[in-house]
């Protein structure tokens, strides 16, 4: 059986898979496998080891008649047509859980870097502008004791709330469903999206990307935020109206934004957001610690090994396929 791996991944993971299967791996770490090559290679593939940058859509499935599983080295799977996979009896594996703490760390790092203008400070120094100490030089926003509003109280939202407690922040959240157990454990307060946007000093977006969340934060929502508010997005860029965000930042409707994700990735250095001073922008690295990425790769490999030997995956998005396979 054959496994297509769409990025160069660490050797130990490849070795684990090639003990049992034929591997076709794209040789580059930071560039996607060209689409035509991917479509050609999946023609006789049994499994695909993918990531957030591949479009696993109907066209892809049409080229892959033997496919049994697609396993993504990510928690998010908005780049995968899960319904189409399920219709075809193809399991979709992903890696929830292991990246929760790393992503919450990054979310908080982005919040702090944005509030305290860390990147601007480094640029200032690099450009030799630092001539003396200044009473109001690079003054940002306080973090300790302020109000944070978390939109999307899933695993990562909870982990961010735990960090915010350490900073004595008041924690508001908005979620599709109210979570009384989390409220009891973490002292977070449920409120409507409008209330959250009005009251929060930090608005942190952590919802998955679904048709319901598309551009859920746009002009109206930025207008509701405080002028001193900082907006952080470590979920998916498609959840935000980027043009409206640009305008809000440019016109001082909000203080700043920290973004790990964008409507269309990658963005280039001439993207309008890059021209602003009141942003911290990073290239979709929420889970990027060595330990976390190794664990994610290992789980993805194990998901594939299990799927190919007819076992249940460690984490699957569409468990309905088990019934199809067994009947
Ligand atoms: C990264 O964005 C992921 O979904 O794991």
Image (tube, rainbow, N blue to C red):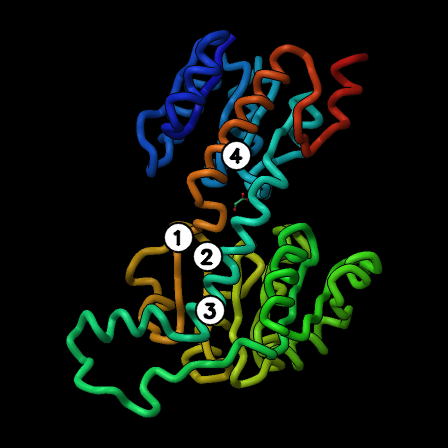
Give how far across and how far down residue 146 sits, in percent. 60, 79
What residue sits right under mark 2 in the picture? 260
What residue sits right under mark 1 in the picture? 283
Where disc 1 sits, the SS reads loop
What residue sits right under mark 4 in the picture? 296
Give how far across and how far down residue 262 sits, in percent. 46, 57
Do labels 4 and 3 touch, CB within 8 Å? no
State yes or no: Cβ of the residue under disc 4 lies below 8 Å from any atom of ligand 1: yes
Where disc 2 sits, the SS reads loop
Do labels 1 and 2 touch, CB within 8 Å? yes
Whole-number angstrom distance, CA of label 1 to CA of label 4? 18 Å
Whole-number angstrom distance, CA of label 2 to CA of label 3? 14 Å
Q: Residue furthest right?
A: 180
Name the quadrant containing residue 184.
bottom right
Q: Quadrant of the C terminus?
A: top right
Q: Nearer the viewer, mark 2 or mark 4?
A: 4
Where disc 4 sits, the SS reads helix
Q: Earlier in the sequence, mark 1 or mark 4?
A: 1
């Amino acid at each position: 059986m054959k496994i297509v791996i769409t990025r160069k991944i660490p050797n130990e993971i490849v070795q684990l898979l090639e003990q049992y299967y034929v591997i076709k791996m794209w040789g580059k770490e930071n560039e996607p496998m060209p689409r035509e090559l991917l479509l050609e290679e999946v023609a006789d593939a049994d499994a695909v080891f993918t990531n957030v940058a591949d479009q696993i859509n109907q066209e892809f499935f049409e080229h892959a008649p033997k496919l049994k599983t697609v396993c993504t080295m990510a928690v998010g799977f908005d780049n995968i047509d899960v319904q189409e996979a399920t219709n075809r009896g193809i399991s979709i594996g992903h890696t929830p859980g292991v990246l929760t703490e790393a992503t919450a760390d990054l979310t908080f790092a982005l919040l702090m870097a944005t509030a305290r203008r860390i990147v601007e400070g480094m640029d200032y120094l690099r450009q030799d502008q630092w001539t003396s100490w200044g009473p109001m030089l690079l003054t940002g926003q306080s973090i300790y004791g302020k109000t944070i509003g978390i939109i999307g109280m899933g695993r990562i939202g909870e982990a961010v709330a735990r960090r915010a407690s350490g900073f004595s922040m008041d924690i508001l959240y908005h979620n599709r469903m109210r979570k009384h157990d989390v409220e009891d454990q973490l002292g977070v307060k449920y409120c409507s999206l409008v209330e959250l946007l009005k009251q929060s000093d930090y608005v942190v977006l952590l919802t998955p990307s679904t048709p319901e969340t598309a551009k859920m934060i746009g002009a109206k929502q930025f207008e509701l935020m405080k002028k001193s508010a900082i907006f952080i997005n470590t979920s998916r860029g498609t959840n935000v109206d980027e043009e409206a965000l640009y305008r809000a930042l440019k016109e001082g409707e909000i203080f700043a934004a920290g973004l790990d994700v964008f409507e269309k990735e990658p963005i280039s250095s001439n993207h309008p957001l890059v021209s602003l001073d009141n942003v911290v922008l990073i290239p979709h690295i929420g889970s990027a610690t060595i330990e976390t990425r190794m664990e994610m790769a290992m789980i993805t490999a194990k998901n594939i090994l299990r799927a190919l030997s007819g076992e249940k995956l460690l984490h699957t998005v569409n468990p309905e396929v088990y019934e199809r396979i067994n009947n």
